[in-house]
Image (cartoon, rainbow, N blue to C red):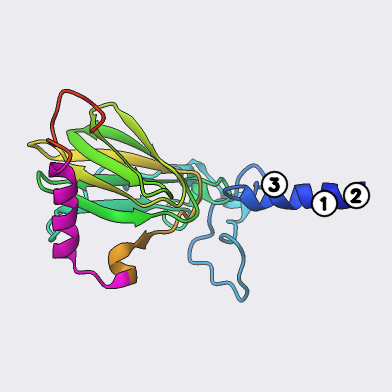
Amino acid sequence: MKTFVVIMFCAIISSVSPDPDNMQDTCPTAPGEQSTFFINGYPCKNPTIINAQDFKSSKLTVAGDTNNYLQSNVTLLTALEFPGLNTLGLSVSRMDLERDGTVPFHSHPRSSELLFVVSGVVFAGFVDTNNKIFQTVLRKGDVFVFPKGLLHFCLSGGFERATALSFYNSQNPGVVTIGGVFGIDQEHIKNMMRSLATGSGSLVTDGDEL
C-alpha cells in the first residue's frame, strides 16, 4: 500500500511540473536536425561544437512589425529560435504596441507568463475560472503575471508606443486564441477589448487597479 501511495505521489508531482528537468548541463537545439522519431523537445547539438553564441540571441532588439489591423506584434523565442533554451523550460517574447495596439484574449496552455513593461503604458488583465476579470494599468518597470492557461490580454494604455518583455516557464508555452477557435473576426475582437478597457474607466489613471 505504501509503495502504491509513493508511486501515485510521484506521478502527480511529475504531471504538474511545467517542463521535465534537463538531464545535462546544456542541450542547445541542433540546427536543421531532421528526426525520424518524435520527442518531447528538440534534438541536442553535438556537445563538442556548443559555444557561447548558442546561449545568446539578438532577435528581440528590433521592434516587431506593427503594420497590421491590431497594430501590435509579439515576437516569441522558443527553443526552436533560441537554441540555448532547449531543455531549460524557458522562453521569452517581445510585445510591441502602437498607440491603439491590441493583443486580444489568448492563453498559454503550458505556461504562466511574467510581463515586464519596458516603455509606455499597457492595460493588461486576465480572466479566472470564476469569470472574474483582473485588470490593471502598467507603466515602465511594472511587472504583471498571467497564470497558466487563463485567458489574458494587453492593450496600449497611453498616448505613445509601448514595449514589454514576457518570460514563460516552458520552452514551448503554446498559444490558443479565441478568434482562432471560434472564428471571430479581428475587428469584433478589437472592439470588444476596447469596450472592456473604456468600461473600466480610463486607460490612463492615477490608480493601478481598475
Asked whether residue 22 is in view, the answer is yes
Q: Is residue 3 above or below residue 162?
A: below
Q: Nearer the viewer, residue 125 or 23?
A: 125
Q: Is residue 126 above or below residue 202?
A: below
Q: Which residue is mark 3?
A: 13
Image quadrant where one finds the C terminus: top left
The location of residue 199, given as percent across then percent down, is 15, 43
Q: Which residue is mark 1?
A: 7
- Which residue is at 58% across, 72% downward? 35
Whether the magenta-drawn stretch holds residue 192 is answered as yes
Q: Are marks 1 and 2 in contact (CB under 8 Å)?
A: yes
- Which residue is at 36% across, 41% downward? 166
Q: Residue furthest left?
A: 159
- Disc sitting over residue 3 in the figure: 2
Cα–Cα span, label 1 and label 2: 6 Å
Please give the range of residues in magenta.
Answer: 182-199
Q: Quadrant of residue 156?
A: top left
Q: Nearer the viewer, residue 44 or 51?
A: 44
The location of residue 137, given as percent across then percent down, is 22, 33
